[in-house]
Image (cartoon, rainbow, N blue to C red):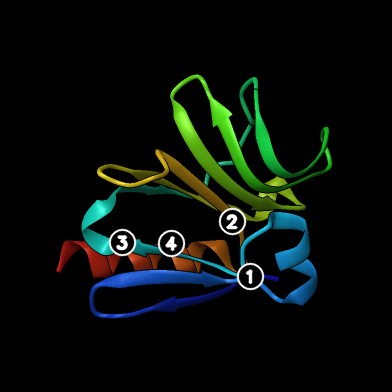
Amino acid sequence: MVKVSIGKDEVTFSLDTREQFLALKNKVSIPLDNIIDVSTERVKPKWLSIKMGTHIPKGFMAGTFWEHKGKAFYYVKDFSKCISLKLQNNDYSKAVFEVEDKHSVANEIRKSISS
């Protein structure tokens, strides 16, 4: 499971060793100023093109994917347990992570970006 750490200026999603191997990254840090929206809605991945990571259709996504609206990062096994961040001024236009308690994490991030 992805570990979430919310600091004063950024939120960091840390991946364990196995997750790092599948996603080709050990963590993703996103400045709070770059987060436009946080959603807990079930994610339905759009058509994906080039990828740098692992993708098992309808089952698992980990890594960087290019979608119609730009580059996105996914680390999701269960799409009903994820949060989705809409981003601006970032390498990614979207970041999607499976977390332990999606409503709690989403509320913490919303609180941090509104302050």
Is residue 61 among what the camera can see?
A: yes
Identify which residue, 66 or 1, lies in the foreground: 66
Horizontally, is 45 left or right of 59 in the view? left
Which residue is tagged 4? 106
Q: Are marks 2 and 1 in contact (CB under 8 Å)?
A: yes
* Along the viewing direction, whichever of 41 and 99 lies nearer the viewer: 99
Is there CB contact under 8 Å for labels 1 and 3?
no
Residue holding disc 3: 110
Q: Which amino acid type is marked by label 3?
A: Arg
Residue tagged 2: 97
- At a point 18% along the width and 62% down the height, the residue shown is 114
Q: At x 29% / y 63%, what residue is drawn?
A: 31
Q: Mark 2 or mark 1: which comes first in sequence?
A: 1
* Element carrying mark 3: helix
Q: Are marks 3 and 4 in contact (CB under 8 Å)?
A: yes
- Mark pair 2, 4: CA separation: 11 Å
Q: In the rendering, which numbered label is found on residue 100?
A: none
> Element under label 4?
helix
Q: Which of these two is toward me, 71 or 99?
A: 71
Q: Disc 1 to disc 4, how far (Cα)? A: 14 Å
Q: How far apart in space, not on screen, are marks 1 and 3 (Cα)?
A: 18 Å
Label 1: how many Cα within 10 Å (few below 14, some 14–19, many 20+): some
Read off the residue under disc 1. Answer: 2
- In the picture, measured across the screen, residue 6 lies left or right of residue 114, that is right
Which circle's residue, 2 or 3, is located before the other in the chain?
A: 2
How many neighbours does mark 2 have within 10 angstroms: few (below 14), some (14-19), or many (20 or more)?
Answer: many
